[in-house]
Amino acid sequence: MIHLPVMEFPVEKLINTARAARERAYAPYSGFRVGAALLTVEGRLYSGCNIENASYGLTVCAERVALFKAVSNGERNFAALAVISGRTEFCTPCGACRQVLVEFAPEMDVYMCNDRGEYKRQTAAGLLPLSFYLPPAAGGDNPPGGKKPPTRLTEPVDR
């Protein structure tokens, strides 16, 4: 994966895109409105907002909406993601979103923002150490993010 240095794109633009996406959130049950903006290494931006459902398990987070939009458009190389909720606390991705982000871009910068325009930065892998990994199916492509299947030693089994 190509990793863009922090200074090669305006972080404020990424955060403002996430803030605008937050305004489109559908959160009638929790009132917790979240926006996300995902930057590809080619400089394209994809935004997402959280979309709740009365059956909470069907709710989708803003981070995954942005990532799924990008992936469905053929994108596979990501540089940064901003996530904001409009509260004073820094908005961090949930565990499910962390796992999905690590799947596609473990070295991607994640900007966790608050309503004062401040942010904390961490890589996706830094947010989820020891993430779950499943090797690709036989004949499948190497997974996004450059992870390679672990080397395994096999021993004969006596039966």
Image (tube, grey):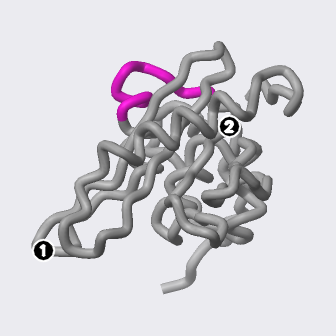
Residue lying furthest top = 42
For the record, the magenta segment spans 69-77
Residue drawn at point x = 37 percent, y = 20 percent:
73
How crowded pointer 2 is (Cα within 10 Å; few <14, some 14-19, many 20+) is rated as many
Determine which quarter of the picture holds residue 151.
bottom right
How crowded pointer 1 is (Cα within 10 Å; few <14, some 14-19, many 20+) is rated as few
Q: Earlier in the sequence, mark 1 or mark 2?
A: 1
**Are the residues tagged 1 and 2 within 8 Å (C-beta)?**
no
Determine which quarter of the picture holds residue 114.
bottom right
Residue drawn at point x = 47 percent, y = 50 percent:
63
Residue lying furthest front = 116
Give the number of the disc on residue 55. Answer: 1
What amino acid type is highlighted by mark number 1? Ser
Residue 108 x, y percent position in the rendering: 72, 42
Above or below: residue 149 compared with residue 145: below
Where is mark 2, residue-wise?
80
In the rendered view, does 22 fall on the left or right side of 53? right
Residue lying furthest bottom = 159
Residue drawn at point x = 78 percent, y = 24 percent:
2
In the rendered view, does 9 fall on the left or right side of 13? right
Residue 118 x, y percent position in the rendering: 75, 54
What amino acid type is highlighted by mark number 2? Ala
